[in-house]
Amino acid sequence: MTKFTIQDFLKKKTERKKITMITAYDYPFARIVDEVGVDAILVGDSLGMVVQGLENTLPVTMDEMIYHTKMVTRAVQNAMVIGDMPFMSYQAGIEDAVRNAGRFLKEAGASAVKLEGGMEVAEHIRAMTRSDIPVMAHIGLTPQSIHRMGGYKVQGKTDESAKRLIEEASIVEDAGAFSVLLEAIPMELAKKITETLTIPTIGIGAGPYCDGQVLVLHDVIGLFERFVPKFVKKYANLKEEALKAIKKYKDEVENGMFPSEEHSFK
C-alpha cells in the first residue's frame, strides 16, 4: 500500500467509496490500525478522556498532543495521520493557530490537522491552508464547546440550527478545508450536507450517509466504559480479556506456577 493522502480522500468521495477512520494515541495500537488498512488515523484530543482519565478534553495541551502524535506517526506506514488541535491552541488568534498547526506537521510528522468550529474559525483555516497545512474542519457537536452547548447534545435538530450547520459546512469548504467531520447531528441533515459539499464528510454519530466514518478506538474495542454514546458500536471487549489474562498471571505468581523452567535461564 502507498500512503493515503488528501487526494485519496477526494477521490473516494468522487467514486462513492467509504472512507475509514479511527483514533489512535500510541505506537502499539497505531501499528495494529495501520496493519488493518484503515485510511486515516485521528490522534484525537479525546485522549484526555480515554487515556488520561479526564472528565473532558479541555485540559489537553499542545505538548501532549505532539507527544502522542509522534508515537502514532512512528508506527504508521500507510494511513494518513491527522493531529487534533486542542482547546486554546487556535482560539486566541490566527497566528497561534498557524504556529500550533505547523507543529503537528513539523515536529510530530502528521499530514494534516483537525480543528473544531465553523464560521468563527474560517479565517484560521484559510491561513493554515495558505501555509500548506491541510485542515479537516469539525462542526455539529464540538466537545471543546461543552460549556456553551450545555453538555454533549445532538446538534441541528431545529430548522434554524440545521440551516446554520449547512451554512457552516459550506463556509469551511470555501475556506479551504479538505474534509469536514460531522458529529452528533441527525442523519438526514448529514446527508444533505454531504450532498451539498464537494469535499468529503466524515461522520461520528451522523448516520450512514456521510462519505466516511470515525470512532474512538477505545470505544470500538471495549476499553472505555465511563459512558457509551448511542452512536458507538462495540466490536470487542478487550477489557474482559485483559482482566482474565492479568488475573491468571496474578494467580500463577501467587501459587508459584510462574515463572516455570520454560521461562527461566539455565
Image (cartoon, helix red, strand yellow):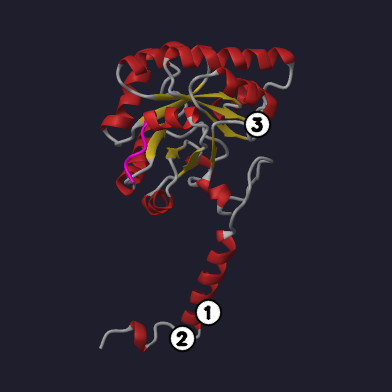
Which residue is nearer to you in this view: 187 or 74?
187
Q: Which residue is mark 1?
A: 251
Q: Earlier in the sequence, mark 3 or mark 1?
A: 3
**Quarter location, residue 196:** top right
Q: Dot 2, how many residues are within 10 Å of its Cα: few (below 14), some (14-19), or many (20+)?
A: few
Q: Is residue 248 above or below residue 216?
A: below
Q: Is residue 33 visible?
A: yes
Magenta range = 1-6
* 1 and 2 marks in contact (CB < 8 Å): yes
Is residue 179 rendered to the left or right of residue 263? Answer: right
Give the amino acid type for the residue marked by disc 2 in the picture. Answer: Met
| Element at label 3 | loop
Whether the magenta-drawn stretch holds residue 120 is answered as no
Separation (CA) of disc 1 from disc 2: 8 Å
Residue 152, numbered circle = 3
Give the amino acid type for the residue marked by disc 3 in the picture. Answer: Tyr
Q: What secondary structure predominates along the stretch shown in magenta? A: loop
Separation (CA) of disc 2 from disc 3: 48 Å
Q: Earlier in the sequence, mark 1 or mark 2?
A: 1
Is residue 182 rendered to the left or right of residue 20? Answer: right
Q: Which residue is mark 2?
A: 257
Nearest to the eye among marks 3 and 1: give it: 3
Q: Earlier in the sequence, mark 2 or mark 3?
A: 3
Is residue 254 rendered to the left or right of residue 157? Answer: left
| Element at label 1 | helix
Q: Is residue 191 above or below residue 24?
A: above
